[in-house]
Image (tube, grey):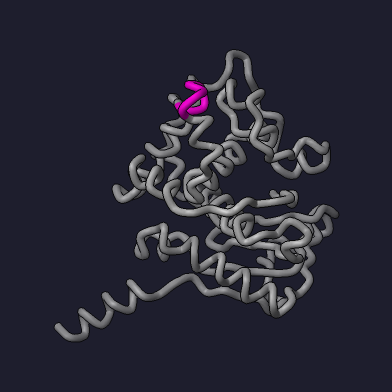
Amino acid sequence: MITAIYLVLQTQLSQPKIVSDIDDNFFPVYWKTEEIKPTAVKIDDREKERSIAAIKKAIPKYPSDFLNRNLKTIFIAKSIAFYGLEYGGTNSLDAIYLANSGARNGFSDAYLEEAFHHEFSSILLRNYAKIFPTAEWNAALPTLFKYRGDGTQSLREGTADITHSSKYHEKGFICEYSTSSKEEDLNMFAQALFTGDKVFWKAYDKYPALAKKADLVILFYNRMNSAFTKQKFRDFAQAPTSSSGTIPQRR
């Protein structure tokens, strides 16, 4: 009995490992190709501590067992690059990669938490693809709309703006970057919902097309774990938030 209780407590207290050392194990082997060419620069000590603080703010928003099943490691660096392009964040099968070259360059505390939720939602979309409300999502998209490609393509084309825009809100998107692919579309909703983005919730109440897709994202999270309810996400918006400032480009 004591052993069982100990194991339960260990599971509840355990969290994904945070790694900042740049070594041969920093990137997955299958990323190390001439096409991808992954590179990373070691994060400054001061920014490392700030990154960890932002991550620790994000982690409690997920049930511990749910988080531990889907995320094993969080890699942090001053900068990361793939395909010759700098990324603010990316993800692998069970890991998140976050870049932080300083608040003065746009990597604010708020941005770092957004990036965590943004990248984690990609992992969840892969892991729980079968329960994503695909038919309803496709029906909620504008008539004849087609996603443009993916995040990397948007970075190359200069169409990766993640600033809130009524132009996109009325069509059911948060921003220009949301139109890249279903994954990026979901990413933007996830970061807004989990950070309690007040601008997002004002748009939610004003634009029916945006609210419809947001509700589908909430449904997806609720299917993954019943702890995720619309009220829970609304509650996040009641907590004090800070501005993200300049937005670094991200995957």
Left or right, residue 93 beside residue 65: right
Query: What residue occupies the far front of the structure in this picture?
Result: 240
Which residue does the image show at 74% across and 50% down from the upper left?
246
Q: Quadrant of the N terminus?
A: bottom left
> Residue 27 or 61: which is nearer the viewer?
61
On the image, the x and y values in percent for residue 133 come to 42, 32
Q: Main secondary structure of the magenta part?
A: helix
Query: What residue occupies the far top of the structure in this picture?
Result: 143
Query: What residue occupies the far left of the structure in this picture?
Result: 1
| 33 lies above or below 216 | below
Which residue does the image show at 39% across and 43% down from the upper left?
234
Residue 177 position by quadrant: top right
Left or right, residue 150 beside residue 54: right
Residue 44 position by quadrant: bottom right
Magenta residue span = 205-211
| 72 lies above or below 239 | below
On the image, the x and y values in percent for residue 39 come to 79, 66
Q: Is residue 23 visible?
A: no
Q: Is residue 5 visible?
A: yes
> Residue 147 or 93: which is nearer the viewer?
147
Residue 246 is a magenta residue? no
